[in-house]
Amino acid sequence: MASGLLKVEGSIDLDQFWPPGTSDADTTKVLITLGSNGFQFRSSLGQRFKPTSVFDGAVVTGKQGTKPVVDKKGRITVRLQGIDAPELHYRPQSALKDRPEHPKPGEKYRTAAQKEKYLELNEDYRQPYGETATVQLKKYLTSIGASPLPCKVVTSIDRPNEAFDVYGRLVGDVVVGSQKANVNHWLLRNGWALPAFYNSMAEEEITMLSALANKARKAKRGIWSHYAARIGSLNKDLVFRRKGTYAQGSDIGKVILPKMFRRLTAWTVNFDAGMVKLAFAEYLAGNTEDKAMLVREFIEQGDAAAREYGFHEFFKKGKLTVRPEELVIKEKPSRLKPAKGRTLAW
């Protein structure tokens, strides 16, 4: 486990959450208290936190190109570590690109008909209880304090480059209120998110979060009473309702692992548009970027030695053969680039 700890002081605008906003239950924007040294780091337990300017003007290069660590409004985007809530809005990318003026030899490009069909299906799809989980989180945060709600974001790292994922999001725990309530833990404990472990996490973190998730699962709290291992077909009528009105009775249905939902959505849209010809299981097998490990092997053998599996190896006869807390996802690499003239040092 990393010995260092990064802390970000800031606040959360509660209106960012759906329905007035677009934030869901496992991603939030935090306004950094830049004027009071918002980013602070300590190298080990017992050391004092010291302000760091390493992230000033820095950018992250990853899945969606280059993204500033801090946006123009002074905010960072935070991915709540160790959890995955039902999708509120997921828009799948096209499997093929338009044919350029100078096409690459052997490269496949989409036809005009395929593009037209893809654009027809190009929606922000959501899962059942994606709205409910978000509403429940906002209700909880509102019970703690008024908006903007002061918070801290903490993450165990040793080097600055370990803080952000491929989407430019800081991965960590959000702590709010005078009682220092951990939002990540609350979501797991109450069943409004499923566990989602990555190889960047330590054994102690995985073990603790597994215990919280298992208690919620056994008590069938939140979405656990609707969780399904069987991966059915995508409900294309279930889409993001921007600034909609929440109606609990309409936000119902079976909840599959959000990571599988995202892949099912991408496959469905591209298959229906004629850009993917494979069945879903074959589609999973062909995605060589998706890698996961079993928690027990990850803990016993370590990140470097544990076997990496393709997602298709956990998908048999239309069902996911492992529970969410049994998987460790291989984190895709990102690169933190400091501002000109700076170095990646605390």
Image: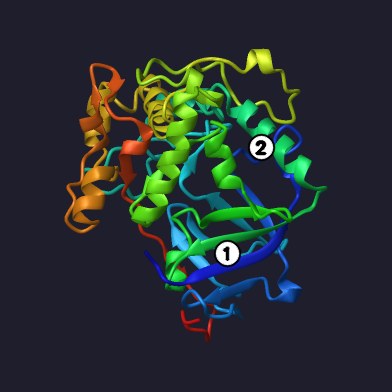
Q: Which image quarter: residue 16?
A: top right
* Tally of numbered discs: 2
Say which amino acid is labelled 1: Pro
Query: Would you call the spot at circle 2 few (<14 residues within 10 Å), some (14-19), or many (20 or more)?
Result: many
| Residue 110: % across, % down | 37, 33
**Where 132 falls versus 302 (above or below)?**
above
Q: Which label lies toward us, 1 or 2?
A: 2
Q: Residue at x 58, y 28 (%)?
A: 130
| Residue found at the far bottom of this picture | 341
Is residue 272 or residue 193 the one in the foreground? 193
How far separated are the C-alphas under marks 1 and 2? 27 Å
In the image: residue 177, left or right of residue 199: right
Residue 273 occupies quadrant: top left
Residue 269, label in figure: none
Label 1 environment density (alpha carbons within 10 Å; few <14, some 14–19, many ≥20): some
Residue at image mark 2:
137
What residue appears at the point 64 percent right and 26 percent down from the top-left corner? 132
Q: Disc 1 marks which residue?
A: 68
Q: Is residue 101 visible?
A: no
Which quadrant of the view contains residue 76?
Answer: bottom right
Secondary element at tag 1: strand
Residue depicted at x 53% and y 80%: 47
Near-viewer residue (61 or 163): 163
Quadrant containing the N terminus in the rendered view: bottom left
- Residue 282 drawn at (x, y percent): 22, 27
Q: Residue at x 56, y 25 (%)?
A: 222
Callout 2 amino acid: Leu
